[in-house]
Amino acid sequence: MKSSRDVALIIMFAALVIVFRFLIGQFVLMVANITFPGFVFLLSIFFSMIQCVSFLMFRGRRWRFLALGLLSTLLYFVFINPSGGWGSEMAIVTNYIVIDVLFNSFYGSFERKNRLLWLTFILQLYYWIAYPFLLLLFATTLFVPFESYFNNYFVPVFSVMLPVIIIEALAGSYIGYKLFRRVEKIT
């Protein structure tokens, strides 16, 4: 019973991630032709909410969060961007691997102390601070020259956007935690 519920949650959250990635990342580019490289990070609060709710709904069980990341990456390549973006997707999958292994190890102790909100704060801070560095690593190693990517994308976007990303990550994890508590009361 638990495994079928987890599979349904993985599929539901992966579809939700894809919908938000399309609406935030691709749709804005197609309709408004906004090419600001950090635009996705302005709306990272939605991704933080989805990640926190899904992480808490899996209740510390291994490989569910990683399966969510792999499925959402696969769906992204099938439906939204079949021709590229491997560097960013490799950074996302690497982040999901670390979160699944590391944070699920601490889930039980945080749950016993009734500190799951703090775990979600730490999880989101890690995800959104590590993501640009992993993106820099994978994108420059595999696709574009380091200096070009660093000067045109990394420094301008993350020197300006890092405080906004941190605030949105904390706000998204708080809202995600509250959503989880409401869902938990219902079920």
Image (cartoon, helix red, strand yellow):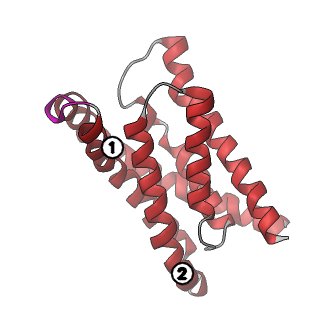
* Residue closer to the observer: 29 or 65: 65
Q: Where, by quadrant of the figure, is residue 59 drawn?
A: bottom right
Q: CA distance from mark 2 to mark 1?
A: 29 Å
Q: Which residue is mark 1?
A: 135
Instruction: Give the total of numbered labels.
Output: 2
Provide the secondary structure element on which disc 1 rests.
helix
Q: Which residue is mark 2?
A: 110
Residue 47 position in % (x across, y down): 54, 46
* For residue 104, side relative to residue 6 (left or right): left
Tag 2: amino acid: Phe
Q: In the displayed image of the protein, which residue is found farthest to the left? A: 147
Question: Over which residues does the magenta segment extend?
Answer: 144-148
Whether residue 85 is situated above or below residue 184 in the rendered picture: above
Per the picture, the main secondary structure of the magenta-coloured stretch is: helix
Residue 38 position in % (x across, y down): 36, 32
Label whose residue precedes the other's in the sequence (2 or 1):
2
Nearer mark to the viewer, of 2 and 1:
1
Provide the secondary structure element on which disc 2 rests.
helix
Tag 1: amino acid: Leu
Q: Where, by quadrant of the figure, is residue 2 drawn?
A: bottom right
Residue drawn at the location 29% of the way across and 38% of the way down: 142
Q: Where, by quadrant of the figure, is residue 35 drawn?
A: top left
Is residue 125 in view? yes
Is residue 118 in view? no
Quadrant of the frame with the C terminus: bottom right
Residue drawn at the location 45% of the way across and 42% of the way down: 89
Whether residue 13 is situated above or below residue 106 in the rendered picture: above
Residue drawn at the location 51% of the way across and 28% of the way down: 25
Q: Which mark is residue 165?
A: none
